[in-house]
């Protein structure tokens, strides 16, 4: 059994130079395209996370946080609890 194909497997006639120039392919650099006024397509990178884009070179945008003084925090929590106790005792 033989498969039937619509493709023409014969090469095109190269009898005239005009037809030959239709099938001739060449590469053109982007500089030549810019000179002709053709808008150059930019490659779009694959969407994903790039850790090098996340950090800016140099200073960070947020100033560094000051360390929390845990002793002062403990004292503040203790005082808040005392205030709540006093409010319950004396309405």
Image (tube, rainbow, N blue to C red):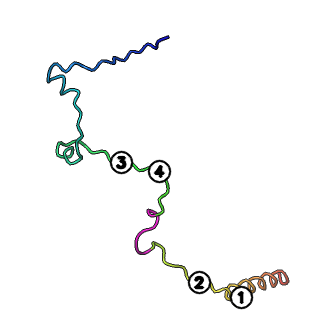
Label 1 close to label 4 by CB (< 8 Å):
no
Q: Which residue is mark 3?
A: 43
What residue span does the magenta drawing correspond to? 52-59
Q: Position of residue 29 (x, y in %)?
A: 23, 45
Q: Which residue is mark 4?
A: 47
Q: Name the residue furthest right.
A: 89
26, above or below 19, in the image: below
- In this rendered view, identify the residue nearer to me: 24 or 84: 24
Q: Which residue is mark 2?
A: 67
Left or right, residue 81 beside residue 26: right
Q: What residue is rendered at 43% in x and 13% in y? A: 4
Q: Position of residue 17 (x, y in %)?
A: 14, 24
10, above or below 58, in the image: above
Q: Which residue is mark 1?
A: 75
Label 3 close to label 1 by CB (< 8 Å):
no
- The alpha-carbon separation of the residues under discs 1 and 2 comes to 16 Å
Whichever of callouts 1 and 4 sits on the residue coming sooner in the sequence is 4
């Amino acid at each position: 059994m033989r498969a039937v194909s619509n493709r023409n497997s014969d090469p095109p006639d190269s009898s005239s130079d005009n037809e030959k120039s239709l099938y001739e392919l060449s590469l053109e650099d982007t500089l030549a395209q810019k000179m002709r006024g053709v808008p150059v397509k930019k490659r779009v990178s694959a969407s994903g996370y790039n850790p090098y884009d996340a950090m800016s070179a140099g200073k960070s945008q947020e100033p560094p946080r000051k360390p929390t003084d845990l002793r002062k925090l403990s004292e503040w929590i203790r005082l808040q609890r005392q205030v709540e106790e006093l409010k319950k005792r004396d309405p």
